[in-house]
Image (cartoon, grey):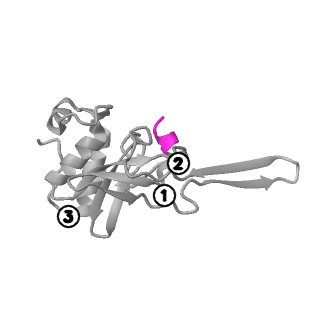
Amino acid sequence: DSAIPAVRRGSRLDRARRIYRWVIDNVNDGNDTFALAPHILSARSGNRARLLAWLLRQADVPATIALVRDVSEDHTPTEMASAETYHALLVRIETEPGVRWVWTANRGAPFGYVPAALRGEDALVLRSGSFRDRVPPSAEDADARRVQVQIQLEPNGAAALVVRETYRGAGAVGWRDI
């Protein structure tokens, strides 16, 4: 109990960020989506998305798990969602500025990161009266890599180079996971 941050302070968005960071830093991710959240919490091992949604609700932050279709899956419109099509899990969080979607599978993922293959895709929100939603598309530079090079040439032909490489999105998450 004392390991969980003081969760009732601040806005819903602030609480969601703190709880997300605690879950990512303290829980080993697992595949059992329907395990009981208190068991995941006590073991500090299990499905992070399940635990995050539960902890957020305990802190009065509306949150649900959503099954999301990957960009590479079948996009044929149907009345019934297929488990083979909707298999990625995101947490859908309702905050003051609006709905935020978060991915919990990578330790290096910042709050609000969604893999490119899930952005702009259909989601089945799992709650009483389930409904379909859409994960927002990404900004144009969401997965950017930028390289800056400064070269200083000396009259004798010697050179000094400074290279700065910056990643955003998937590239940054990959580096942070190392």
Q: In the figure, residue 38 lies in which quadrant? A: top left
Q: Residue furthest bottom?
A: 97
Q: Residue 120 got which mark? A: 1
Screen quadrant of the N terminus? top left
Q: Earlier in the sequence, mark 2 or mark 3?
A: 3
One can see residue 72 in this view: yes
Q: Residue at x 26, y 56 (%)?
A: 16
Give the residue type that dot 2 points to.
Answer: Val
* Residue 125 on the magenta segment: no
Tag 2–tag 1 contact (CB < 8 Å): yes
Identify residue for label 3: 10
Q: Residues within 10 Å of mark 1 (few under 14, many from 20)?
A: some
Say which of 148 and 102 sits in front.
102
Q: Residue at x 87, y 54 (%)?
A: 155
Q: Secondary structure at mark 2?
A: loop
Q: Report x, y in % for residue 50.
A: 26, 42
Identify residue for label 2: 71
Q: Residue furthest left?
A: 1
Give the residue type that dot 1 points to.
Answer: Gly
Q: Is residue 176 left or right of residue 160?
A: left
Q: Main secondary structure of the magenta part?
A: helix
The residues tagged by marks 2 and 3 sit, at their Cα atoms, a distance apart of 36 Å
Front label number (3 vs 1): 1
Give the residue type that dot 3 points to.
Answer: Gly
Q: Earlier in the sequence, mark 3 or mark 1?
A: 3
Q: Earlier in the sequence, mark 2 or mark 1?
A: 2
Q: Report x, y in % for residue 97.
A: 32, 70
